[in-house]
Amino acid sequence: MTKAGWIWIDGNLVEWDNAKIHVMSHSLHYGDAVFEGIRFYKTEKGPAVFRIAEHIKRLFYSASVFSMKVPYTSEQIATAIKETIKKNKIEEGYIRPILFFGQKMGLSNIDLDVHLAIIAIPWGSYLGDKAVRVRTSSFIRIHPKTSDMDAKISGHYVNSILASVEAKKQGYDEALLLDYKGNVAEGPGENIFIVKEGVLYTPKTGSILPGITRDCIIKIASDKGLKVIEKDLKLEDIYNAEEAFFTGTAAEVTPIAEVDGNKIGKSENFPIIEMLKEEYMNAVRGKNKKYENWLEFV
């Protein structure tokens, strides 16, 4: 595990090895923490946090699902994120703000104390630099009537872990989950897009987390004159795609080489993915003024 020197927790910057919570934390036992994954990138103006406002807005939304009484404002959390980056003297990496409940045994979390920790660490490529091999999971995505799929809840990721570990044990790089209707949903921590005849398709919301990177790609593609359609997709649509790729804060834009042994496309070249990835990476590194409002400079 990559360490940084300091972690922000409940208003204080604490040395890494001393950043601890009590074993009776309700969220440790029951999974009712909420979190965000945020990237920050090296730019000519110094480190810049990517779409910090949208991430913090979703963090508060996720907290509202549990009626969490967040003891900080959005502005205070943004300041704390930047303080943590500065203290650790990291130019580029990953930020994990997490809200969790205090100590209690028993399911109810009503009126429990709420704590906030912010971790900033160096982080490179999540799925590697090559197109990935993907396996459809035997596990389905969480049914949308069992939880709030717009919220980023720690407990949801048990489903993701099972799918991802299963795929890796079978020799694949990542998993793909279907929803309860048999439609393509998403990866364990990524949204998915396909390209067919120059049009981008991506699963509609309902059984997926509507990712912030997903939103960026929809915006960039539209700005480039590409049509983007959100609709139900079947596995056959993925198998027959000309190009396919994952998006996510960690995954960024990752091409998919094959799914369930079916090679994607007719060549090793993915021109639309390459163009979108270049535009996205230019945006996050402050090289495209059009998207500079997505950056919060530290």
Image (cartoon, helix red, strand yellow):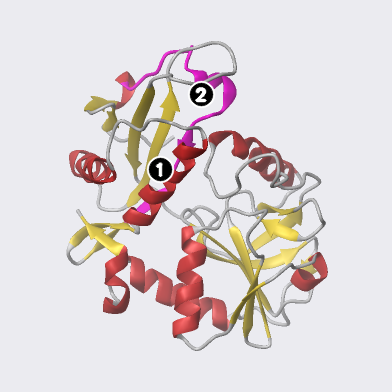
- Image position of 6 with respect to 231: above or below: above
Could you tell me which residue is drawn at 25 percent across and 25 percent down? 14
Q: Position of residue 43 (x, y in %)?
A: 24, 64
Magenta segment? 19-40
Quadrant for the N terminus in the image: top left
- Image position of 3 with respect to 43: above or below: above
* Discs 1/2, front: 1
Could you tell me which residue is drawn at 51 percent across and 78 percent down? 274
Q: Which residue is mark 2?
A: 27
Q: Which residue is mark 1?
A: 60
Could you tell me which residue is drawn at 63 percent across and 84 percent down? 199
Q: Earlier in the sequence, mark 1 or mark 2?
A: 2
Q: Report crowding for label 2: few under 14, some 14 to 19, many 20 or more residues within 10 A (C-alpha).
A: many
Are the residues at dot 1 and dot 2 in contact (C-beta closer than 8 Å)? no
Amino acid bearing label 1: Phe
Q: Position of residue 214 (x, y in %)?
A: 52, 64
Q: Position of residue 201 (x, y in %)?
A: 65, 74
Amino acid bearing label 2: Ser
